[in-house]
Image (spheres, grey):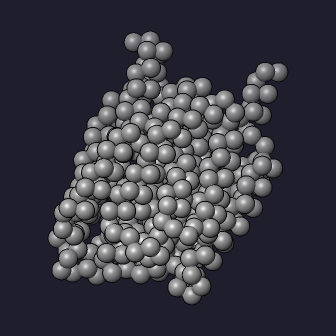
Amino acid sequence: MDTNAILKKNFRYNLLEGALYLSTNPILYAPVFFPALIRNLGGGSLAVGAFPVMVYLVYFLPQVFAAHYATTMPFRKPFVVRWGMVQRMLVLFLGVVIGMFGASMQTLALFGLFVLFSLNQAAAAITAPAWFDLVVKTTTDTDRGKLMGLRTASGSILGLVNSAVLTYVIGTVVFPLNYAAIILLMFMLQSLSLVVLNRVEEVEPSPVREAMPLSKLYERIKAILESDAVFRRFLISAALLTIGLMPFGFFLIAAMTRYSLGESYVGWFTSTIVFTQIFSGVALGYLADRYGHRFTLLICATATCGASLVALASNNVWYYFVVFFMVGVNLSLELITRYNFAVDCAPENDRPMYIGLMNAWLAPWYCFSFLGGWVVDKFGYEMVFGGGLVFAVIGIVVLVLTPDPRRAKLALSSK
């Protein structure tokens, strides 16, 4: 099979894998399902705020080490499939724990939720740099933005079905079996995505680096930061925008508390996010290919500001549908276009390292979500929404002042 045929086949498999996996994102990774579950298990604002802190810390902090390990392997796929299986089994265990203990032993179930989902994210962290480099290896640069946009849109279409199932199950099945059933459905979809990923053909070995001790790894990281001013400035912007995401975990709880909403709104708000992603994912993917990933990052950051601003101005529940529309725009491509920006900054043999370094840098900034839980209890939701808005605006300013690395590379290649 010729190279073009392999690339086309890989494009289709990467797209189908993404559709299946990303269809679970509006439930497992959007700020609706788990805040509601924590609330039902007796957790307060501090628990809601602590959940994303724990999850993102264990997801982002190990990635610089995982990225270094990935650069020592000529082929990425076996590693990605092996750790992807571990990640998915932890989703299965979580569904079982919630179903068995969510009614009779809520403290134990809440503890299990934090531990098992954190371990799930740790497995994802180990996998992420190698997985994204596998995607980059097995597709063309000119198709990457389109692939990511289509993955998001197709995943959102399937996710809309999942949201409808969520709305029905949450409203008709007794707690905690309703939440457990949804988690087990997500396990099945993610497992199917792994089967599809295993069909991707990784033909050529990657350039490899020799394993190095931690002292030399530190020196390598220091050298990257000292030599790459664009990447440095991007990291500052990304940190500020991460703090700007602090209100996301509290939008649902604020709406349900203020307007005494029923559990069915967990499904309706999730559907709003998913419906938005169907269109915004495709649009942002094509815009990324045409105008660069900095441009789409700015759109996602503007949506972050818009969500907090509308939540501040809300005086009835309908405002929150606009809030979750903005959340959907951000979630449709913000994480993956941030990966692409880091890849555009990196030399070929350092792509996993740049991704891992970026994610490890961002991990501590998610601690502001825990601070947000304390602020909610002391000063109310408005203070959290306003604080997130201010940091997001500053992050946008820094990003505007950051050059687009892809344009710089294209300018050099044309000389």
Q: Is residue 396 left or right of residue 335?
A: right
The answer to whether residue 219 is visible is no
Residue 268 image-quadrant placement: bottom left
Q: Residue at x 56, y 53 (%)?
A: 326
183 and 363: which one is in front? 183
Q: Residue at x 55, y 26 (%)?
A: 143
Residue 196 image-quadrant placement: top left
The answer to whether residue 101 is visible is yes
Looking at the picture, how far across and down is residue 295, in whole percent? 69, 41
399 and 126: which one is in front? 399
Up-down relation of residue 308 to residue 67 (above or below): below
In the picture, the quarter occupied by the C terminus is top right
Up-down relation of residue 11 to residue 40 (above or below): above
Looking at the picture, how far across and down is residue 152, in whole percent? 46, 40
Looking at the picture, how far across and down is residue 336, in whole percent? 54, 45
Up-down relation of residue 114 to residue 394 (above or below): below
Residue 216 image-quadrant placement: bottom right
Q: Residue at x 31, y 44 (%)?
A: 161
In the picture, the quarter occupied by the N terminus is top left
Looking at the picture, how far across and down is residue 251, in whole percent? 50, 67
